Amino acid sequence: MTMAPVEYEDIQGLVRFGYRGMTQAVFLLLRVTDARAARAWLAQAPVASAVTREPPPATALQIAFTSVGLQALGLPQDLVDGFSPEFLSGMGGDASRARRLGDLGPNDPACWQWGGTPETVPHVMAMLYAEPGRLEDWGAEAMAGAEQGFEQLAMLTTSDMDGVEPFGFADGISEPSIDWQRERAAKDVEREDYTNLSCLGEYLLGYPNEYGAYTDRPLLDAARDPGAVLARAEDAPGHADLGRNGSYLVLRQLEQDVAGFWRFVDAQVHGDPARRKQLAEAMVGRTMDGQPLMGRASEPIEGEDDPRNTFTYRDDPAGLRCPHGAHIRRSNPRNADLPPGPGGFVSWAQRTLGFDADALAEDLVASTRFHRLLRRGREYGPGVSLPDALAGRTPQAPTGLHFICLGANIARQFEFVQSAWLAGLRFNGSPGESDPLIGTHLPRADGTATDSFSIPSADGPAHRVCGLPQFVTVRGGAYFFLPGLRALGFIAKGTP
Ligand code: HEM
């Protein structure tokens, strides 16, 4: 069957472009004070689409909503309820979610600067991107009049660290490649080879995902959209699709203790600079300049042409080249083997998809194509040089990452990766360890320590680095919906 072409003009540009060249960015977290005025502002907001232009634009505005934001803007409750349960309850909304995401201790939503209590959950996020020197003037122009409908809850500024995150590692290297042409057969079959190509429906609602299914989203009887503002659903004739061309956007403000990180690593190697770098790189899984510890694969990888990403872990089952617990091996285990279990589809689904509590508590190296994230984050704060970090000189202002990822299913993508692979204590049979970079390393309820990082060794037991402190602290977070432009128009129009 030939698939309808993708409507780039209806998709917000962040999904396709990432706006890396627009090195200035600010994220405004807003709350609705006057729904009518807020909708009037949204209706005229110059939101940039995913259409390519020559010359490319120098600025871009993107708009996203939380579920309470959609309610505050007057979207009928039955339509809001059509979004996914995790979007509806929000990131900081309940204790069980907080536990699963590792939002405990210093990460507890009660301590967040925003997003952790009902009064501090943003309604709308305006994301402003610009080429150097353009942000201030253009931003003021783009946001003109917004104050009539919104109050500002927080302004998240960002810094351009030239492709390096605050610990000093090259970032933004590995990304899934999206099947914009809609040529990839979307069906639920087990695949043996790692592929970097993902179905469009993994990132945008309204298209088939890697299971060959359409993710649930609000569909409404076409009679409720008489002007046909919305696209019609591909899979439900006679229905207007509020989700189509939209994506869920996860935002987490992650403060990084750069001095704490480098001083800890330095102490482990008694100040030896070469071994310090080596240990830090083992924790990440890449060298500081972005080369994979695995080297390159001999076989090409579908959907991948960056030589820094043409590798899998197939030839390193023991984790001798890249430790199993390294951040990039946890966050995308690529071709890693399925966890043990009996044959058959039900067992396979339970083991790989995390539907089964026992499987979650077991080994969680799963079929990665269901758990990819499109990362769109930005660094913030002044950054810290290595000499300053080693000397314990911390910057005046906090520094870290505004982690952002896009996906059509928050539970299966962000929450799974965060909870099962990064915060989880049994990843790949690890002995009670979480991600060395972003784990809380808090003891378990029974007091057992979880603050180690194992580096397997060919000639003896693994070398265990113990006593890892927490290097990354969550300061805020929320789940947003980044609508397609027609859906944005529908929300802005309001319902009589
Ligand atoms: C402050 C916190 C974090 C830091 C410093 C950090 C750092 C890095 C670095 C240096 C890389 C390697 C560069 C690259 O492949 O692009 C990377 C990759 C990655 N990170 Fe993080 N990260 C952080 C938080 C997170 C979180 C919260 C998630 C997901 C929940 C995540 C998911 C990923 C993924 C999926 C990759 C790509 C892995 C691959 O495909 O090989 N990261 N990160």
Image: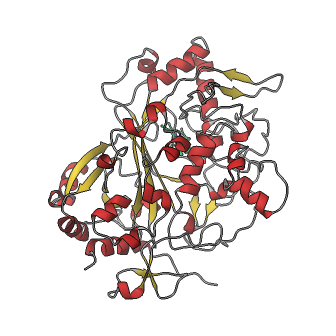
- Above-or-below relation of 24 to 57: above
Residue found at x 54% / y 73%: 207
Observer able to see residue 166: no
> Tell me, what colour scheme is on the image?
secondary structure
Locate residue 101, reporting x and y percent: 53, 43
Quadrant of ligand 1: it is top right
Viewer-side residue, 330 vs 269: 330
Viewer-side residue, 475 vs 368: 475
Report the side of 215 relative to 351 (left or right): left
- Above-or-below relation of 135 to 235: above
Residue found at x 47% / y 88%: 238
Report the side of 63 relative to 188 (left or right): left
Locate residue 149, reporting x and y percent: 18, 61
Report the side of 111 relative to 1 (left or right): left
- Above-or-below relation of 81 to 147: below
Task: Say which quarter of the image contains residue 12.
Answer: bottom left
Locate residue 420, reporting x and y percent: 62, 45
Which corner quadrant holds the C terminus?
bottom left
Viewer-side residue, 80 vs 293: 80
Viewer-side residue, 209 vs 380: 209
Which corner quadrant holds the N terminus?
bottom right
Observer able to see residue 87: yes
**How many badges with numbers are in the image?**
0
Locate residue 68, reporting x and y percent: 34, 59
Report the side of 302 relative to 162 (left or right): right
Residue found at x 49% / y 81%: 233
